[in-house]
């Protein structure tokens, strides 16, 4: 490790030396350029003709000179042909010099002679300028280059300083309060205790209560964890130190720990304050698993965070807040009492919360009269706060692109699909056969979803390319769900395979269009077996944690079950997939006429909305699903 650090220090010195050389050469070239420009200007600026003393004496004799100005040894002669320049003898006066050239006193008296004696300072400046200017420039050059080298050296020693961004309570532009955060009512109630402690810690300390030193915000990406942390600082009126977990880790071992010490030192001096560490899992992963390579920098940084949080006193009024969407990989030492002992779960917003979030994001946007944010909230289940912000922004962009000054409901609805699937690819023109295959593929998804009792109702079918999809079928539940049943999962897998089965049944062939459907449905079937215990053969055993990671603190790729159990899992996943395929095939075979009707209509119009699709179903004898039917089945 010492040899490695020496090598890195040598590289820093080498880069500093190269920088010094480059700056020296650049400055020298600039000096040469300035001198050349000065010489050129000086030559261009001198347009006076220079004459000798003998010529001057002759001109005076002939009466062609009216005035002579004496400036030291230089003579500025006002001639009938204009101003001319000459020089007199160094130790003699002008009169004496002219007399030596045969000019009589009478002729000299006919010429106006003015003598300008330079001031002492000006004289010495003129005399010393050729020597002082190069000296001053050399001194400036040495100062400039030494400053560059010092800056490079100081940069090498500033790695250990904290890079946290600080928001002070008097900064009104960046201040956020709970009013700016919609939804998350339970989370805000939990965090109000932190606000109360920062505002009035004496109330808690007098009764012997100790506020949690650390608060960890857990939730999916985009649910507003950072926004809530800023809102706590804004409500309490304290300084907010924000830093990402990845900013602690550098190529030099020990730099992360030094930055942690510096960050906590700054916060203690600024107390009351909040330290917010975003993406805590970047440095807070379980130690000793081998995850993250052989560099010990991350573990040293984590150890320093643990030490600093242990050193907190109740009167310091500094609270550490952190955010992560991977709480399952955090080291247990972080989550023990006395450190991050307060855990606040932040869920995806429900329908009412989504409507409130849309109101906040649309506060300064001009809406048309037909805008109904309640409908938009109903059509965006599973959207996070960040998704809803993107939806609002995309709708404003669509309206501006079409030169309209108000956002309509149609803009918002189009933005939903853009956020979910990506922008339309109108330039991606399908051939006649590809269009037919895509139409039958999406019709297969929609028809299976409409017949199966536990599948979500279809809202839209389209064969217009969006993102990487050649077409899509939009299904939306009647209401938000926190729990999903085994029957719902099985129907979802059958719906995913509807397009695959349709291609095989209609065209007696398969295309790559079903690849994503197969990946999604296979992953769902495997989760049913390994995570949710929904396999009758294997039973109520969970073999994997969230995200497909092994249980019991094992590393990536490790597993806690035998090869025989692994084979049974694979067999059960295959059985789920085959049963779903057979279920979809039976539905599509029995309703072949409806399948053809939907597909032909899609080829004609490219997009079928819910109202038109429901009419096709009713006309062919398929009953529409209602919210009461779903509740009754549940």
Image (spheres, rainbow, N blue to C red):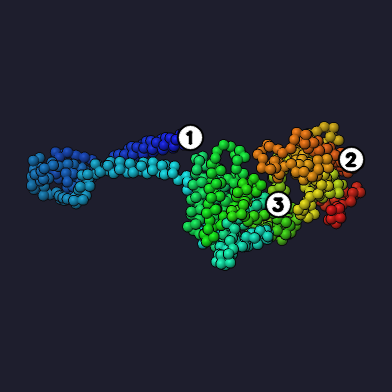
Image location (x, y in percent) of residue 312? 53, 56
Q: Is residue 615 left or right of residue 393?
A: right
How far apart marks 2 and 1 lie (CA) works out to: 67 Å
Q: On the image, which quarter does residue 73 sit in?
A: top left
Q: Which element is circle 2 on?
A: helix
Determine whether 267 is above or below 245 in the image: below
Q: Nearer the viewer, residue 251 or 173?
A: 251
Q: Nearer the viewer, residue 612 or 539?
A: 539
Residue named by callout 3: 383
Q: Is residue 13 left or right of residue 215?
A: left
Q: On the image, which quarter does residue 227 sit in?
A: bottom right
Image location (x, y in percent) of residue 463? 77, 42
Image location (x, y in percent) of residue 192? 62, 62
Q: What's the residue at 61%, 44% (across, down)?
A: 285
Q: Is residue 144 visible?
A: yes
Q: What's the mark number on residue 625?
A: none
Closer to the chain start, of discs 3 and 2, is 3
Quick one: which residue is furthest to the front in this view? 208
Q: Is residue 577 visible?
A: no
Q: What's the mark number on residue 586?
A: 2
Q: Judge depth for marks 1 and 3 and give the one in front.
A: 1
Closer to the chain start, of discs 2 and 1, is 1
Determine whether 347 is above or below 527 in the image: below
Q: What's the residue at 68%, 37% (across, down)?
A: 558
How far apart marks 3 and 2 lie (CA) works out to: 34 Å
How far apart marks 1 and 3 lie (CA) works out to: 48 Å
Q: Is residue 275 left or right of residue 516?
A: left
Q: What's the mark number on residue 4?
A: 1
Q: Judge depth for marks 2 and 1 and give the one in front.
A: 1
Q: Which element is circle 1 on?
A: helix
Q: Do the numbered discs 3 and 2 sit on residues whose CB atoms are within 8 Å?
A: no
């Amino acid at each position: 490790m010492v040899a490695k650090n020496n090598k890195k220090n040598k590289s820093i010195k080498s880069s500093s030396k190269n920088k010094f050389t480059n700056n020296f050469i650049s400055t020298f070239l600039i000096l040469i350029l300035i001198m050349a420009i000065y010489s050129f200007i000086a030559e261009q600026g001198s347009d006076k003709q220079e004459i000798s003393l003998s010529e001057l004496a002759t001109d005076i004799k002939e009466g062609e000179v009216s005035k002579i100005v004496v400036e030291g040894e230089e003579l500025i002669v006002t001639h009938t042909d204009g101003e001319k320049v000459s020089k007199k003898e160094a130790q003699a006066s002008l009169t004496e010099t002219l007399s030596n050239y045969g000019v009589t006193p009478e002729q000299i008296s006919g010429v106006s002679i003015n003598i300008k004696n330079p001031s002492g300072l000006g004289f010495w400046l003129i005399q010393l300028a050729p020597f002082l200017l190069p000296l001053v420039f050399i001194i400036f050059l040495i100062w400039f280059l030494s400053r560059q080298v010092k800056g490079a050296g100081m940069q090498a020693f500033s790695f250990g300083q904290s890079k946290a961004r600080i928001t002070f309570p008097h900064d009104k532009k960046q201040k956020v309060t709970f009013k700016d955060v919609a939804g998350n009512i339970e989370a805000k109630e939990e965090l109000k205790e932190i606000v109360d402690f920062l505002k009035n810690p004496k109330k808690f300390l007098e009764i012997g209560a100790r506020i949690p030193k650390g608060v960890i915000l857990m939730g999916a990406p985009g649910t507003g964890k950072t926004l809530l942390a800023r809102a706590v600082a804004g409500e309490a009126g304290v300084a907010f130190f924000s830093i990402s977990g990845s900013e602690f880790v550098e190529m030099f071992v020990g730099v992360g720990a030094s930055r942690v010490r510096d960050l906590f030192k700054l916060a203690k001096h600024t107390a009351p304050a909040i330290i917010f560490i975003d993406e805590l899992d970047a440095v807070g992963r379980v130690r000793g698993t081998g995850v993250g390579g052989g560099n010990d920098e991350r573990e040293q940084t984590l150890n320093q965070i643990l030490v600093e949080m242990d050193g907190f006193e109740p009167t310091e009024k500094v609270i550490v807040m952190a955010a992560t969407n991977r709480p399952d990989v955090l080291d247990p030492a972080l989550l023990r009492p006395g450190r991050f002992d307060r855990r606040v779960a932040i869920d995806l917003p429900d329908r009412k919360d989504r409507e409130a979030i849309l109101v906040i994001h649309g506060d300064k946007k001009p809406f048309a009269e037909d805008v109904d944010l309640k409908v938009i909230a109903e059509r965006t289940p599973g959207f996070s706060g960040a998704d809803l912000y993107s939806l609002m922004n995309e709708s404003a962009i669509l309206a501006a692109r079409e030169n309209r000054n108000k956002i309509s409901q149609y803009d918002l609805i189009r933005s939903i699909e853009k956020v979910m699937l990506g922008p339309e690819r109108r330039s991606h023109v399908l051939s006649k056969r590809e269009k037919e295959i895509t139409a039958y593929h999406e019709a297969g998804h929609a028809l299976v979803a409409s017949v199966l009792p536990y599948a979500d109702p279809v809202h839209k079918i389209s064969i217009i390319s969006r993102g990487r999809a050649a077409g899509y079928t939009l299904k939306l539940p009647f209401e938000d769900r926190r729990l999903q049943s085994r029957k719902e999962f099985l129907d979802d897998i059958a719906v995913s395979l509807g397009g695959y089965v349709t291609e095989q049944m209609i065209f007696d062939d398969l295309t790559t269009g079903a690849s994503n459907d197969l990946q999604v449905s296979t992953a769902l079937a495997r989760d049913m077996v390994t995570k949710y215990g929904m396999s009758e053969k294997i039973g109520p055993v969970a073999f994997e944690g969230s995200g497909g990671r092994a249980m019991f603190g094992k590393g990536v790729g490790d597993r806690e079950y035998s090869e025989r159990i692994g084979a049974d899992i694979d067999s059960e996943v295959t059985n789920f997939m085959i049963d779903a395929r057979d279920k979809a095939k039976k539905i599509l075979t029995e309703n072949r006429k409806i399948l053809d009707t939907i597909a032909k209509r899609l080829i004609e119009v490219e997009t079928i909305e819910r109202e038109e699709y429901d009419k096709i179903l009713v006309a062919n004898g398929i009953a529409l699903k209602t919210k009461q039917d779903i509740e009754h089945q549940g």
